[in-house]
Image (cartoon, rainbow, N blue to C red):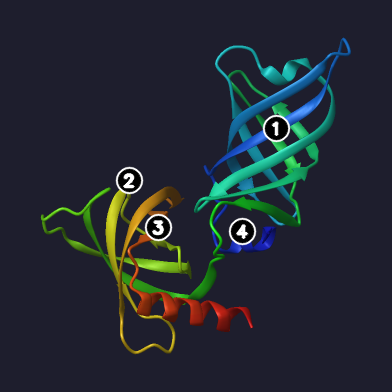
Amino acid sequence: MMNWTYALTQHILVPKTECKLIIVGETADGQPFCLETRVFLREAGLDFFSVHVYFDLANPLDKLEQISFIEFSFQDQGINYYSFVDLVQLDPGVSSCVLKLVSPQELYSYQNRRHCRKPLPPHTNATCRVIGARQRSAEETPAFVGQLLEISRSGTSMITPHRMIESLMLELSFHLPEVEAPLLLTGEVRSSTPFSSDSYRVGIEFHDVPLSSLNLIDTYCEQTSS
């Protein structure tokens, strides 16, 4: 489960984030209406948020007469988050429409992994280097800095000014709070979404983590939970 406020303050939900809506209801002639469509977040606040629905030909929502329910969902770091939401306003356009929706208080989750991530202190920086794609490469690449947001034994996420591509392999060196020795870990880019006009939020899944590093990460996550 994730709190909506947390999703906003941690910049998990930002403009242009790709999401999904499932809209179930009834048409004007009494037929069942069911639509699953990809949408893009337009703006998000504590009380309301809005999404863009794009279409090529006819607006699929033109047939909708009555709404039974709307499910809003998105994926972050391999976890699917979802919640029922209420429609406030629908603004139709020529090739798209904007839906204004009530912000949910909580987002439920469905995940394949067992490890929940814990937030890291602000300005937890990692020195990063691309070391391959799906496998290691012998070529040396320039180092860059990323600001880590959260961590678990399965992965981490960070903000970086550099656009990352899914399946890139990264090497990360960083310090956990109150741990003197740096961790040197390898991970695969699983997602990369715009964070601002000049930065990206990157999700990373760890590969081949040494047991000593796993123990340090587990200890940090347990202390953060307590």
Mark closer to the chain start, 1 or 4: 4
Residue type highlighted by circle 2:
Ile
Q: Is residue 198 visible?
A: no
Q: Residue 65's x, y, as percent?
A: 84, 20
Distance between the Cα atoms at labels 1 and 4? 20 Å
Of badges 4 and 3, nearer the viewer stands: 3
Distance between the Cα atoms at labels 2 and 4? 23 Å
Q: Residue at x 53, y 77 (%)?
A: 221
Of badges 2 and 3, nearer the viewer stands: 3
Q: Residue at x 77, y 34 (%)?
A: 89
Residue 165 image label: 2
The extreme top residue here reads: 29
Judging by the rendered image, the residue that carries numbered circle 1 is 22
Residue type highlighted by circle 3:
Ile
Q: Is residue 40 above or below residue 104?
A: above
Q: Residue at x 67, y 35 (%)?
A: 21
Residue type highlighted by circle 1:
Ile
Mark closer to the chain start, 2 or 4: 4
Mark closer to the chain start, 4 or 3: 4
Circles 2 and 1 in contact, beta carbons < 8 Å: no
* Mark 1 crowdedness (10 Å alpha carbons): few <14, some 14-19, many ≥20: some
Of badges 2 and 4, nearer the viewer stands: 2
Distance between the Cα atoms at labels 2 and 3? 11 Å
Residue type highlighted by circle 4:
Ala
Circles 1 and 4 in contact, beta carbons < 8 Å: no
Q: Is label 1 in a helix, a strand or a loop?
A: strand
Mark closer to the chain start, 3 or 1: 1
Distance between the Cα atoms at labels 3 and 1? 28 Å
Judging by the rendered image, the residue that carries numbered circle 3 is 204
Q: Is label 4 in a helix, a strand or a loop?
A: helix
